[in-house]
Amino acid sequence: MSQSDPRSTAPDAAPQSQDVPSPEVQPREVQGSSKQAQLEPQRRDSTGQYLTTNQGLRVSDTDNSLKAGARGPTLLEDFHLREKMMHFDHERIPERVVHARGSGAHGYFQVYEPLTELTRAKVFQDPSVRTPVFVRFSTVVGFRGSADTVRDVRGFAVKFYTEEGNWDLVGNNMPVFFIQDAIKFPDLVHAVKPEQPDQMPQASAAHDTFWDFISLMPESAHVIMWVLSDRAIPRSYRMMEGFGVHTFRFINEAGKARFVKFHWRPVLGTASLVWDEAQKIAGKDPDFNRRDLWEAIEQGNFPEFELGVQIVEEEDEQRFDFDLLDATKLIPEELVPVRIVGKLTLNRNPDNFFAETEQVAFHPGHVVPGIDFTNDPLLQGRLFSYLDTQLIRLGGPNFAQLPINRPVVPVHNNQREGYGQQEIHRGRASYFPNSLGGGFPAPAPEAEGGYVHHMERVEGHKIRQRSPSFGDHFSQATMFWQSLTPTEQEHLVDAARFELGKCKVMAVRERMVHEFFSRINHDLAVRVAEGIGVEPPAADLSQPVQQLAPEVGVEARKRTDGIRTRKIALLAENGVDVASLNAIRQALQEAGATAEVISKFPGTLQGVGGEVKADKGFLTTASVLYDAVFVPGGAQSAAALLRNGDALHFVTESYKHGKAIGAQGEGVELLRAAALIGVALDAGGLQSQAGVVTAQGPDTAPDALALAFIEAVAQHRHWNRPDPRVPA
């Protein structure tokens, strides 16, 4: 593979700046102004500027309202007070009903090779073109003030600013959805939102109304398995897959149509939290995923995702034992492999959260020539819902004129009025056909880029009915269960016990066990029943399905060939062996990880051989915010850590969560005091067992210790530990 190929960048290589083209392929923006150039006139920097009103009048005093005397009444004529308060009173727009809490970033997309045989969409034709994008990640259920690490579906919405107009690929981090028909969407959201009497619980599905609804909706079986799995608590947005969910159409220049499913694959591989960890992070840092995305971009560790497509010929539409139009089903990759076609790179944070991340408006109906819809009844309803939502959320029909939503190509139409109109249209004619405007703006022929819907023969009686081909609800849920590793299955069972254990109505618990989980897998149903006080089912109602290769679990998608962007905690106190600490820190940084020194208090530590800066204190951080932990040598440092319960908890909690743990010299004493069950810590030399790496004595080369520890960190988690029952 040549170095000019965008795929040739190794996952652990330093990310290249957008301004550094490859030596052979000169990247260029889409035709017309780039999105960043278009946004530049909207940016404001008030450094060194005087305060003014909205009318440009300089303000002399913004600390005191205009009064009749120093202790007198405020005067109505204080225009600055009125304007300032008016803006403050109206600063909040209605938050999104779902996906309210989100985080966004700018970037670009490049296709790897022309896809002319599949689609006429220009975004997929020229590998040298960098199409600007804005991406918004989000949780679904919680309000804006909820936490990032709740168990939930995550939104993965991408706005492509193409030279043919905007294309919005509005997806999730799960390939399937809860319902088959959009008419059930209000019911789903009403059920999962906080309950009506007390508005609790926040950002959680663990309550009666949600599981009451789900227990009566067997079509939700598949996605529920995803929600209860580790997929619902991603370690990072940068390590999270995305899916278009629906089946769309690709159409090429000849008019040939094919079905297409869209996949986003993180270059870093997938990684998830464990549930205990996710709950603690919600208290320690509720902005955990948002902060991770922001800091990665600021540090130049640009998040990257490869775009994959599954292509199905129209004549093969009926060859599967499920319906391609059913959004509760996926196409197994063993049947239709995912073809990787391009890469998305996020390389710039927003300048203003409200103006960009909050005001961005996505809509699955925003497509370009070469991309079309199918008759998926969930997609069809979304085509109405998203547009309708923006009218109330963004104040009217001109939301597309907000800077973040504007396409990079010119817009010409006859919609000249309405709330928030920002254009000054000239000419008398605001209608078509017309002669007073020379007949313009006029519809474009297909040859000139005019959008033409795919011609499809449609006929049938008007009827409210579900197609029989949508009737199998449990086989893919069973497939999902069988694809998980035993550890992942255990996590799913624990999640179900937690969620249903929060339900107060026993009938809901029983229905989920006997009429829902028992149809997916009998062992699953029995294990869940045992944990929620329900009589285990006697009969096995599940149907056997073909055992497929593991393809959907986090373990099957993780990457273990590097530790780029991982965060490692180095525990140290006064008297730390500075050479030991610096050696491991340098090795970690050279491997692309971030290493932070944690002590009782932040500040300067007096070590053996020099000084060391402690980045954070135990009070303001925790093991759950790191991917691994290392304890350097130094007798005085080790003794101080042994007297600190926070340090002991840091190590034992990391062990409980399956993270790599390393120690050198006297630092091993902290691991020994933490009583890491089943791990041999008494042997000298370099030892590595179940992700616990230690080196005692002078015979171990620092490079060998660092290499062994890095290999342990690269595994993400170590589920093979002899006994994970530790007091943390």
Image (cartoon, rainbow, N blue to C red):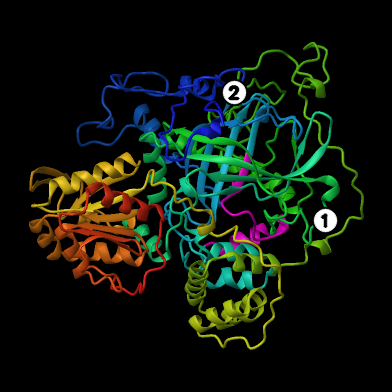
Quadrant in the picture for the N terminus: top right
Q: Amino acid at mark 1?
A: Arg
The answer for how far apart the CA atoms under marks 2 and 1 are is 37 Å
Asked whether 619 or 59 is in front, the reply is 619
Q: Position of residue 363 (x, y in %)?
A: 64, 41
Residue shown at 72% from the left, 48% from the top: 247
Determine which of the numbered discs, if any, sits on residue 215 in the image: none
In this view of the protein, can residue 135 be seen by the observer?
Answer: yes
Q: Is residue 173 magenta?
A: yes
Number of numbered tags placed on the structure image:
2
- Please give the range of residues in magenta: 169-193
Mark 2: few/some/many CA within 10 Å (<14, 14-19, 20+)? many
Identify the secondary structure beneath mark 1: loop
Residue shown at 41% from the left, 56% from the top: 716
In this view of the protein, can residue 102 be seen by the observer?
Answer: no
Asked whether 204 or 197 is in front, the reply is 204
Residue 717 against residue 527 in the figure, above or below: above
The residue to which callout 1 is attached is 319
The residue to which callout 2 is attached is 128
Identify the secondary structure beneath mark 2: loop
Quadrant in the picture for the C terminus: bottom left
Task: Give left or right: position of 145 versus 94.
Answer: left
Residue 690 against residue 285 in the figure, above or below: below
Residue shown at 40% from the left, 30% from the top: 83
Q: Position of residue 244 (x, y in %)?
A: 64, 47
Q: Amino acid at mark 2?
A: Ser
Task: Give left or right: position of 425 versus 701.
Answer: right
Q: Specify the quadrant of the image occupied by residue 390.
A: top right
